[in-house]
Amino acid sequence: MGLMEAGRAAQAGTVESMDCLVTISPDAERRRIEISGSGVSRFRATMEQKINQVLDKLGSSENIEISVQDNGAVDVVLGARVEAAYLRFKGVIDA
Amino acid sequence: MALNAVKRDIPSNIEGYGSTDGKLFGGAFARKPEGCRAGAAIRSRGPNDGGKFLGSIRDAIAASGLASGMTISFHHHLRNGDFIVNQVLDECAKAGIRDLTIFPTALFDVHRALIPHIQSGVIRRIMGSVNGPIGQLVSEGELAAPVVLRSHGGRPRAVISGDVRIDVAFIAAPTADIGGNMSGRAGKSACGSLGYAFTDAEYADCVVALTDNLQHYPIAPISIPGIYVDFVVQVGSIGDPDGIVSGTTRVTRDPLRLLIARHASKLIEASPFFQDGLSFQTGAGGIPLAVTAFMKEAMKRRHVRGGFGLGGITGYFVDLLKEGMLKKLMDVQSFDREAVESISSDPRHIEISADWYANPWNCGAAVNQLDVVILGATEVDMDFNANVNTESDGALLHGIGGHQDTAAGAKLTIIAQPLLRGRIPCVVDRVHTVTTPGEVIDAIVTEFGVTINPRRKNLIDACKEAKGKDAVHLVPLDELAERARRMSGPMAPVRQKDRVVGVVEWRDGTVIDVVRQIFPENISS
């Protein structure tokens, strides 16, 4: 898989209850996390920590924007969606 | 600031509400009434005084003497189909009337059309439930005075005791005659019971009936007699029938909710109240309806016949009445077409007022006769206190309904709820808002089993006696809370300002909690 394909936005997840939709796209400056939806008011810090943890484990060092549209996903779901979106972004797995 | 009996810090003076001195919640049954009932202005209409009929809402507003700063009331029997509240406020705005206090028994999504009137100052205060966009607006501090939340029983108590004086009551009537006699049973906008409107009719200084089905004098049967009614207005339509009554409500098919309902049903069956004459209230929610279905099965199996069903009535309760599983229905609000049809045709299906249903300050409301009630909550805490008013972000988005009244009245009060809603735990260390105190809540039922308030030792013993397939799976509260914490992860506190945007009254008029303004960025969409 070449870098050419790695530039495009990739998604994983749904907006069903207890799930989230994760979109990863290139960012000009840094790793940027945007979260909206039901978990944001009370769980933003917990969610950011989980997202960073998953991306670090996958060895991500790119400048990317991770946009999460949350509908009440617990951490294991959020982590799985971030991982899938990132691997799609990298072209490692199919969309 | 002073702590009330559920350890909430209540400001000694709340701007736009007044002093809370002597009005701190002191226990579910602590406050007793004093003095006499309040009363409406005495009016007379003699044989030579002309008729009550007026051609438009605008004429009625003029005739009623409605002026800036007054209090106007509405009932919510037309629910999300209501055309009247918005129209009346539109006409008030056109007439240049401002700073109104609106005193509805509840507001629905359709009333989002009031937002411009809130922003322009036509509406200064809301005493009643707020939800959806109006709730969000209130939570973010857009209303001049705090919303005052009262239960279905607390509201008529406030009127009868004089806490609230209604200047003009606008009562939508699916059927009315030229003398102002009203009924909800017939007409294209039929809604069944008119229970929430009774006290307003008796205690308002001026009563306006609005109907789209004007009949000759007198109609029969009559729910609210015209002796209380000053004016009658004919309008094209008081509401949208599809928003007024729902179609047949179906029991949930969600396995998680069915499991919760099964646990709750087993608890009821094991309780000392499961015997002939059993009375209950379950409302129209998914889990409570499923509990009703399971209870029916258990009643048949054990040859138990119920007494009465109470509250908001659905087709499910009507079926129980028809099959002889219940002897009477006491209906303050008819939820669906089956209920409307039944109250119109079956004398065992009784229309009751909100006062009769739930007021703590009369000589015995119907809730006092209740054996079992199934309720929901957004959160419950380690003291068994329940929150039904605010969401996890602190937004005031729900009314109290009959929650406080039925919990206080029933012998067995059950909160049935999944442990998590999305990621949000429903069992927490401390609820954001106390709506109903733990002293009147007997059990919490989740998918993990039944958690009984340790104060109810007899109930715990009864559950332990149930064996085999009737066994009740008991879970201690701390285990439940720990499970919720593990699943949801660490939660940040709600970010809020000091300003009070909502006052939650206990049904006796004391302040059980306040709701504070939230930051706009709390919006979750």
Image (cartoon, coloured by chain):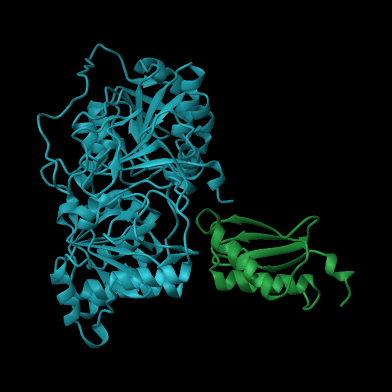
Q: Residue at x 78, y 55 (%)?
A: A29
Q: Is residue B348 left or right of residue A76?
A: left
Identify the image quadrant of residue B515: top left
Q: Is residue B455 left or right of residue B210?
A: left
Colour of chain B, in one word, is: cyan
Q: Is residue B95 above or below residue B198?
A: above
* x, y percent for residue B413: 24, 61
Res. B283 in view:
yes
* x, y percent for residue B153: 24, 43
Q: Residue at x 45, y 50 (%)?
A: B494
Residue nearer the viewer, B250 or B256: B256
Colour of chain A, in one word, is: green
* x, y percent for residue A85: 71, 70
Identify the image quadrant of residue B32: top left
Q: Is residue B145 left or right of residue B444?
A: right
Res. B376 in view:
no
Q: Residue at x 51, y 38 (%)?
A: B112
Quadrant of the snapshot with the N terminus of chain A: bottom right
* x, y percent for residue A90: 79, 72
Q: Residue at x 79, y 64 (%)?
A: A9
